[in-house]
Amino acid sequence: MEQIKITQVRSLIKRPKSQKATIQALGLGRVNKDVVVEATPQIWGMVRKVNHLVVTEKI
């Protein structure tokens, strides 16, 4: 399965609770923190929800 690297590039200050929860579920929480996860449809949906806060790269 394909993997993607997700890096948080924007702060969570003044963001809705749902976006904060999505970032936490992805394993992020601080600016410039990154995680490598499997590229499942569920992960892509979460990334789409917070695409203005993160940057993704295919590995």
Image (cartoon, rainbow, N blue to C red):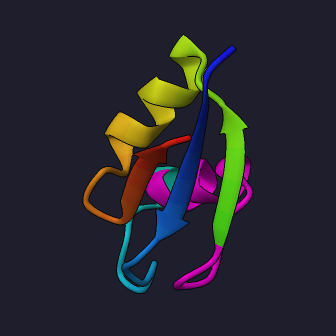
Query: In x, y percent, where is residue 22?
Result: 57, 48
> Quadrant where the N terminus lies?
top right
Q: Is residue 57 above or below residue 43?
A: below
- Residue 40 image position (x, y, % from top left): 60, 17
Q: Residue sitting at 69 percent across and 57 percent down?
A: 35
Taking the view exactly as shown, the residue that stands out farthest to the front is: 59
Q: Is residue 7 magenta?
A: no
| Along the line of sight, the residue nearer the viewer: 45 or 21 | 45
Classify 57 as above or below 53.
above
Q: Considering only vertical position in the picture, is 58 above or below 32? A: above
Number of numbered callouts drawn? 0
Give how far across and how far down residue 15 sits, in percent.
Answer: 37, 71
In the picture, which quadrant includes the C terminus?
A: top right
Give the residues in magenta: 19-33
The quadrant holding residue 53 is: bottom left
Q: Residue furthest left?
A: 52
Which of 43/37 is in front? 37
User: Where is residue 19 drawn, in percent x and y?
Assistant: 46, 55
In the image, what residue occupies the spot 57% across and 19% down? Answer: 42
Q: Is residue 11 left or right of residue 21?
A: left
Quarter occupied by residue 54? bottom left
Q: Is residue 23 above or below residue 58?
A: below
Q: Residue at x 37, y 51 (%)?
A: 50
